[in-house]
Image: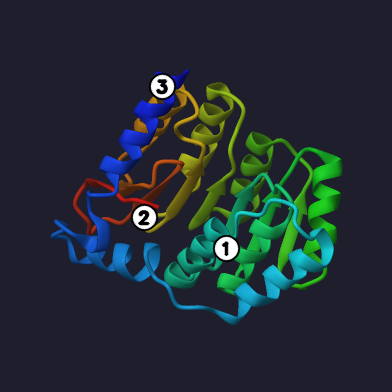
């Protein structure tokens, strides 16, 4: 266990050298994305709104605002008209996503009734265009495909096993337009999950991927060349 921890630490430190501040990146799109989205440091009013709400409702409960802020910037950058969040955690991620583009429709798929109710309670404190769906992730994605067609922005929360990822990927792929974005959390929990993620990123529509270690970002665009970037986060 100790040797594994040392190996993981060394791996993360080595990764910090690669593509930091766009170093060694020749693609104008990837360079701009890394420097102006992933590493962007500007503050936004929505950050304060969401984080003050968390302090008021949940005090010192663990809260990954760094990841939430990145998701806000991703939505703010791509400006999708429709988004899907597969899983809802505590509702704060939903707020970061929705406030990134308040004009967008966010569908949140969460089969667990208790989690869904808790997330709904949080999101009603900062009202936005969020619809919660009480189905399994594969079922929810299928129903959205039938009702909405293509979905340009999808976030898949951390899943428990590789089978759940594979089922979700099978449903996500037909939903993606030529220009779409997929964020997948927990890609390095297990070797099998990382393998499933890499297989998903080899789909025809996927062109550029950003590996942020804990999660991955896949960008679809017919104008981009296929490339993977390892970015410290």
* Residue occupied by mark 1: 82
Residue 23: x, y in percent? 18, 59
Q: How is the image coloured?
A: rainbow
Residue 150 shows up from this direction:
no
Marks 1 and 2 in Cβ contact (< 8 Å): no
Q: Residue furthest front?
A: 2
Q: Identify whether 113 is placed above or below 73.
A: above
At 86% from the left and 42% from the top, the residue drawn is 114
At 53% from the left and 23% from the top, the residue drawn is 162
* Residue occupied by mark 2: 178
Q: Residue furthest bottom?
A: 45
Looking at the image, is mark 3 or mark 2 earlier in the sequence?
3
Camera-side residue: 61 or 146? 61
Q: CA distance from mark 1 to mark 2?
A: 14 Å
Please state if 25 lies on the left or on the right of 7 as rendered: left
* Residue occupied by mark 3: 4
At 50% from the left and 29% from the top, the residue drawn is 189
């Amino acid at each position: 266990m100790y040797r594994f921890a040392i190996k993981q630490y060394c791996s993360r430190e080595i990764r910090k050298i690669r593509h930091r501040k766009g170093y060694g990146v020749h693609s104008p799109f990837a360079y701009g994305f890394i420097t102006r989205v992933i590493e962007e440091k500007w503050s936004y009013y929505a950050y304060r709104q969401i984080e003050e709400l968390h302090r008021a409702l949940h005090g010192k409960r663990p809260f990954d605002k760094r990841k939430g802020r990145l998701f806000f910037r991703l939505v703010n950058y791509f400006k999708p008209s429709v988004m899907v969040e597969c899983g809802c955690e505590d509702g704060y991620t939903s707020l970061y996503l929705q406030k990134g583009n308040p004009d967008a429709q966010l569908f949140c798929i969460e089969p667990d009734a208790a989690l869904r109710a808790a997330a709904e309670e949080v999101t009603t404190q900062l009202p936005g265009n969020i619809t919660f769906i009480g189905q399994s992730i594969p079922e929810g994605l299928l129903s959205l495909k039938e009702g909405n067609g293509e979905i340009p922005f999808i976030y898949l929360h951390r899943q428990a096993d590789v089978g759940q990822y594979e089922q979700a990927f099978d449903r996500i792929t037909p939903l993606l337009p030529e220009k779409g974005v997929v964020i997948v959390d927990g890609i390095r929990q297990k070797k099998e999950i990382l393998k499933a993620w890499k297989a998903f990123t080899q789909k025809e529509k996927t062109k550029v991927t950003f590996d942020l270690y804990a999660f991955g970002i896949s960008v679809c665009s017919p104008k981009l060349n296929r490339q993977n970037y390892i970015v410290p986060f």
